[in-house]
Image (cartoon, rainbow, N blue to C red):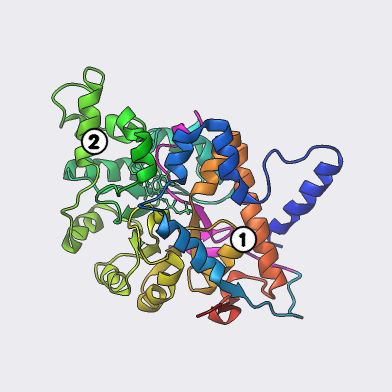
Amino acid sequence: MAKHWADFQYEIYLNGMTGAVPRLPTDLTRLEELTEQRLGPGPVGYVAGSAGSGSTARANRAALDRRRIVPRMLRDVHERDLSVEVLGRPLPAPLALAPVGVLSIMHPDAESAAARAAAAQGVPYILSSASSTPMEQVAEAMGDAERWFQLYWAKDREVTRSFLNRAKAAGFTALLVTLDTPLLAWRPRDLDQAYLPFLHGVGTANYFSDPAFQAGLAKPVHEDPNAAVMHFVGMFADPGKTWPDLEFLRENWDGPIVLKGILHPDDARRAASAGMDGVVVSNHGGRQVAGSVAAADALPRVVEAAGDRLSVLFDSGVRTGDDIFKALALGAEAVLVGRPYAYGLGLDGQAGVEHVIRCLLAEFDLTLALSGHARPATLGPDDLIEENA
Ligand SMILES: Cc1cc2nc3c(=O)[nH]c(=O)nc-3n(C[C@H](O)[C@H](O)[C@H](O)COP(=O)(O)O)c2cc1C
Ligand SMILES: O=C(O)C(=O)c1ccccc1
């Protein structure tokens, strides 16, 4: 029998009766405010912030809220199984932790704690290129648990080649290539606070520890850290890249490659033609193009374009179990969640991230059951209506 994630609710009730209430709220939308109280406006401003006046982040939420579930009755949901296969990998549930860089601004144990939490719950951890901890160290913290690597596709080809080799050696199985951040967007909250973690060297660990990166510096990192930071800023992403450049990645990575940040169906078709294995429909949590289409509104057309040629994953705005249900009903195979686990980390380290994973999946399990489904595979557009469409 598969694990029933919903059982977490009785664990909470029963613990609560002995006075052991959970240390974090079960409504994950409350975490941002609590984290801000704990850590102050700089770090939380960076995590919570988005592009422009925030219209894309708001649109992400509105597009999920506007879709409403139409539950079905009298279907056998006694035995449920949330497991799915994504990119040829068996997952216990259709959820992975999104690549979030610079996590040491949330907690000193940073990515290692988040990765351990993912490993403990069996959920894949996607490590950012811009992590505060070198990838080898994060991999070691995870044992043999499922891990994927997110690539910021650097200007320097040798740095990219080195990252791919290191990630492979450290046991990362799939590669997510983020395409929506060739430049950092206009982010007023960070601009007005003059707070950008990597200008303080946070999020540069993979680069500073890399021989190919070091080869591009006039002086060793410890002799001129500021120059090293500026070198990182100038090379970590490349606005000059185009579709034919994907060939280099295909030649240098044997495992699945997923393009993150796809919103247009024609780009999904190009991804398939370029031999990619999947896409993440994402607008980077509203942090890149202000005024962009909401991720959930872009999803159905990308799913249609992908057909059975690509795995389609989804992120941007997932906060609850019913959001996971909706994304899957719109055709995603799995979702990634970003900010909620960063707040969980900020509030309670590894335990906080595990809390976020367990709450999301308990709520998803219950939403599934209460809507008449025993497994993700039976979800489809028929399970939703769109209000005011
Ligand atoms: C603080 C922060 C840092 C991020 N860093 C990265 C990154 O290094 N690489 C990347 O591909 N996406 C990054 N993202 C985007 C996430 O992977 C993901 O697309 C987004 O957070 C999903 O939206 P959500 O936060 O609403 O769940 C970051 C997001 C946040 C909030
Ligand atoms: O903040 C982000 O959204 C992001 O993707 C990023 C980019 C560079 C370094 C760290 C995070």
The label on residue 113 is none
What is the three-letter code of the residue carrying label 1? Answer: Gly
- Dividing the picture into quadrants, the one containing residue 269 is bottom left
Judged left or right of residue 98, residue 258 is left
Q: Secondary structure at mark 2?
A: helix
Magenta residue check for 102: yes
The residue most toward the right is: 17
- Dividing the picture into quadrants, the one containing residue 288 is bottom left
At a point 28% along the width and 67% down the height, the residue shown is 271
Residue that label 1 marks: 321
What is the three-letter code of the residue carrying label 2? Answer: Phe
Q: Predominant secondary structure in magenta?
A: loop
Residue that label 2 marks: 232
At a point 79% along the width and 52% down the height, the residue shown is 10
- Tell me if residue 165 comes above or below residue 90 in the rendering: above
- Nearer to us in this view, 61 or 92: 61
- Nearer to us in this view, 30 or 375: 30
Ligand 2, image quadrant it occupies: top left
**Residue 200 pos. (x, y %):** 33, 28
- Tell me if residue 265 comes above or below residue 200 in the rendering: below
Span colored in magenta: 79-108
